[in-house]
Image (cartoon, rainbow, N blue to C red):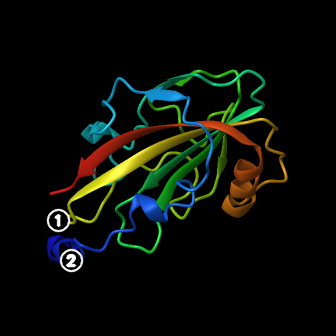
Amino acid sequence: MTTLGRLLRKARAGNHRSVLAGIGVPETIVVTSDAFDDGGSMPLKCAGRGVGDNQSPDLRWTGVPDGTAALVLIIEDDDVPLPRPLMHTIAILDPQRDHIDAGALQPTSADIRFLKTPLGRGYSGPRPIPGHGCHHYRFHLFALSSPVPATVETKGQLLHAIRRYATARGTLTGVYERP
């Protein structure tokens, strides 16, 4: 696998190809974690199945606008060797929340609604191809002025709601490299 990673080292989606990067709302939400600093290395315990413990990091945020009706958390890998960044996790959160505890992004969490990604439901931690180099994992948090209806079940439907109702956003970036 390391040879494949090295061969694909220059093949990267890039943040500029993210559908989330083009959502033009103020970046007034500040997202932080005790597990890593913005732009810092994510710990092994946060790495995906077969690599680490697949434990979601703790997250905290401030700056959510008054009147927010929903929060949406999307975790993307910008450096995957695909045409667009890969969404690892999509979670719809109660607007009153101001944090997520370590390990809480699990499908069994009663107060978090997950949408399916190509990697499943719930948290899917970093698991880049060995030898591919450093990957950037962006934790995007969006504040929406309208609730996300239960009828929204796909990524496309959710992106439509985000484009229509997002009022603010914040991003925390963690990096992970697999030898």
Q: Residues within 10 Å of mark 2 (few under 14, many from 20)?
A: few
Give the mark, 1 or 2, whose residue is nearer the N terminus. 2
Of 113 and 21, nearer the camera is 21
Left or right placement of residue 103 versus residue 121 in this view:
left
Of 91 and 68, nearer the camera is 68
Indicate the position of residue 14 as horizontal and vertical percent values.
Answer: 38, 63
Q: Mark yes or no: residue 57 visible.
A: yes
Q: Residues within 10 Å of mark 1 (few under 14, many from 20)?
A: some
- Identified at 31% across, 30% down, the residue is 37
Q: Which residue is mark 2?
A: 4
Q: Amino acid at mark 1?
A: Gly
- Identified at 45% across, 50% down, the residue is 124
Q: Amino acid at mark 2?
A: Leu
Q: Which residue is mark 1?
A: 131
The quadrant in which residue 153 appears is bottom right
Indicate the position of residue 128 as horizontal and vertical percent values.
Answer: 30, 60
Of 51 and 18, nearer the camera is 18
Quadrant location of the C terminus in the rendered image: bottom left
Q: Are marks 1 and 2 in contact (CB under 8 Å)?
A: yes
The quadrant in which residue 160 appears is bottom right
